[in-house]
Image (cartoon, helix red, strand yellow):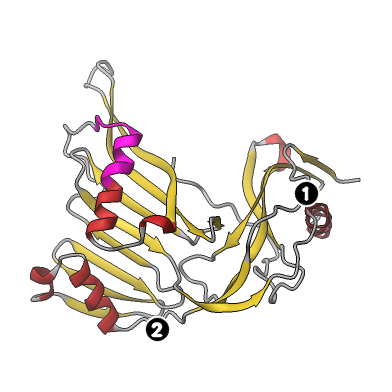
């Protein structure tokens, strides 16, 4: 028998005002890329910038400035390569997470990246660097940037998954060095949710899935409820509620474990399948 340990469970379906929404098509074009560049205050860069269209994205580049817009999702990635995650050998970030959220919010407001009631703080990540002298002494560790992540909210419900995130990168002085945004615009209500499936049914679906993959042991660390938004390279037509299970799967011969996730549609009248799983579940290493 498979050994599936549910470390944290959701006992009943949440009582939340959820709907199923249709999403606007990404409609990525060179015009939209240029408009976003102006939104970010890059008018001076545009005079000499070059545009390049690739299979999955449109890229605007000038010097160290790089702006990418992904065709399937409409996701935006902007970085100043001269400063983004670059160690100048002296910087050491001194402000705390609360201040990081404050500065990042100001940037979001300035560039009109999202409305204040559309997101909430999620977490702050940091990039650490270390150094030592030639005698392997005087070891020093510094923090050279902060990645401030905000989570999208719809109807007061969090948006889960790789999408629905807005991340602002700050250098040690609090200046923005880059941003990432996957945030598909809502078009209209597609249908009302007639009711939510009980979490136990979603758990049973997870167990059946693991069994079909030959996975005999797993720890289910958490179960979350929210809207689910896909990532950079995925086309998505609807935004709908889901149960998201975070898993810890042991590797062969006791060599540690990998983290993964399993997503189940939560609405009784869900639209299609949120994720079509590959034959093998792949590890997604997180930024620490």
Q: Which mark is residue 27?
A: 2
**How many residues crowd mark 2 within 10 Å: few (<14), some (14–19), many (20+)?**
few
Instruction: Give me the residue at 43% from left, 42% from top.
Output: 123
* Magenta-colored stretch includes residue 95: yes
Q: Residue lying farthest right?
A: 1
Q: Which residues are magenta?
A: 93-103
Q: Secondary structure at mark 1?
A: loop
Residue 190, compared with residue 252, is above or below; it is below
Q: Nearer the viewer, residue 136 or 83?
A: 83
Q: Main secondary structure of the magenta part?
A: helix
Q: Judge left or right: residue 261 versus residue 170.
A: right
> For residue 12, which numbered disc appears in the image?
1
Where residue 161 appears, x then y in whole percent? 55, 58
Between the C-alphas of marks 2 and 1, the distance is 39 Å
Of 239 and 203, nearer the camera is: 239
Residue placed most toward the observer, 154 or 31:
154
Disc count in the image?
A: 2
In the image, taking residue 202 as reference, residue 222 lies left or right, namely left
Single out the mark in the foreground, 2 or 1: 1
Q: Quadrant of the N terminus?
A: top right
Asked which secondary structure carries label 2, the reply is: loop
Q: Please report the residue visible at 41 percent of the width from the left and 51 percent of the height from the top.
A: 150
Res 205 → quadrant: bottom right
């Amino acid at each position: 028998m498979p050994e599936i340990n549910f470390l944290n469970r959701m006992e009943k379906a949440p009582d939340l005002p959820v709907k199923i929404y249709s999403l606007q098509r990404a409609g990525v074009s060179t015009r939209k890329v240029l408009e976003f560049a102006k939104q970010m205050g890059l008018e001076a860069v545009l005079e000499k910038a070059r545009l390049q269209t690739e299979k999955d994205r449109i890229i605007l580049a000038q010097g160290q400035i790089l702006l990418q817009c992904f065709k399937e999702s409409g996701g935006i990635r902007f970085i100043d390569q001269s400063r983004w995650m670059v160690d100048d050998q002296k910087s050491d970030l001194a402000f705390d997470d609360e201040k990081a959220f404050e500065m990042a919010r100001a940037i979001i407001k300035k560039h009109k990246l999202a409305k204040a009631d559309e997101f909430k703080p999620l977490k702050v990540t940091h990039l650490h660097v270390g150094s030592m002298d030639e005698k392997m002494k005087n070891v020093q560790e510094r923090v050279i940037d902060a990645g401030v992540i905000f989570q999208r909210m719809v109807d007061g419900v969090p948006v889960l998954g790789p999408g629905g995130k807005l991340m602002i990168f700050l250098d040690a002085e609090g200046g923005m060095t880059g941003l990432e945004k996957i945030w598909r615009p809502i078009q209209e209500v597609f249908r009302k949710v007639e009711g939510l499936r009980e979490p136990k049914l979603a758990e049973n679906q997870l167990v059946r899935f693991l069994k079909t993959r030959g996975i005999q042991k797993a720890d289910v660390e958490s179960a979350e409820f929210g809207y689910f938004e896909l990532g950079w390279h995925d086309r998505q037509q609807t935004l709908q509620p889901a149960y998201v299970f975070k898993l810890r799967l042991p590797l062969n011969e006791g060599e540690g474990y990998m983290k993964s996730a399993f997503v189940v549609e939560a609405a009784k009248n869900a639209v299609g399948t949120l994720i079509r799983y590959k034959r093998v579940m792949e590890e997604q290493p997180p930024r620490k």
